[in-house]
Image (tube, rainbow, N blue to C red):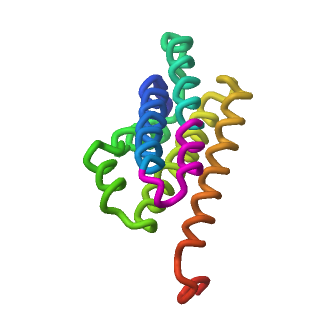
Amino acid sequence: MTVKWNGVNLLKTIAENEKSATRLYKAIAAEARIGEKFFEQLAEDEERHEKIYNALLAKFEKEIEIEIEQSEAEYIDLLIESNSLFDEELIEKARKVFTKSQIFDIAEKAERDAVLFVTELQKLYPDLAKEEMAIILNEEKKHLKKILERKRESQPMFGRGM
């Protein structure tokens, strides 16, 4: 069975995630114990992505209703509902308390979520800012790859690859 579904909340969630990731990356970069330039660049990219999503929201807010399978609507709604942003407490812990490994785990989650949400957005709205979405998805995948590489490099060799 199909239902009418409005993607405004999905776009808002993605924009909020980008804003939250920007704040996290800026806070980590300010501490400079992991790679100041690396996290500054991530923050700049996420900030630019957020602006694109907010512009899309402003442009398409009224025209974003589609008809999709009910199970797909329920799935996307659950993704949105279970989404968690990086609050000030977590950001402060990342700056002061967390180890490199913990920080890379948090950054990995942010980038995995970004890839997932952008992929779902593209699937639901294949013609919505097609070029921009392709660029953003590619950047998010590059972010995830770089984070995973740095995470791997920061871990001891013992036990890897098993």
Q: How many marks?
A: 0
Relative vertical location of residue 10 with respect to residue 75 in this rendering, above or below = above
Left or right: residue 92 compared with residue 50: left
Farthest residue toward the right? 131
Q: Nearer the viewer, residue 85 or 83?
A: 85
Instruction: Give the image location of residue 100, x and y in percent.
Output: 45, 66
Relative vertical location of residue 24 with respect to residue 144 in this rendering, above or below = above
Instruction: Kindly tell me whether residue 3 is visible in this rendering.
Output: yes
The residue depicted at 54 percent of the width and 22 percent of the height is: 66
Relative vertical location of residue 107 with respect to residue 80 in this rendering, above or below = below
Farthest residue toward the left? 89
Q: Nearer the viewer, residue 154 or 72?
A: 154
Q: Quadrant of the C terminus?
A: bottom right
Relative vertical location of residue 54 with respect to residue 72 in this rendering, above or below = above
The residue depicted at 45 percent of the width and 23 percent of the height is: 8
The residue depicted at 40 percent of the width and 64 percent of the height is: 102
Instruction: Kindly tell me whether residue 74 is visible in this rendering.
Output: no
Q: Nearer the viewer, residue 69 or 160?
A: 160
Q: Nearer the viewer, residue 18 or 44?
A: 44
Question: What's drawn in magenta, residue-wise?
Answer: 31-44
Q: Main secondary structure of the magenta part?
A: helix
Instruction: Give the image location of residue 155, x and y in percent.
Output: 52, 76
Q: Quadrant of residue 98?
A: bottom left
Q: Quadrant of residue 154?
A: bottom right
Per the image, is 43 magenta? yes
Q: Quadrant of residue 40?
A: top right
Instruction: Give the image location of residue 108, x and y in percent.
Output: 50, 57
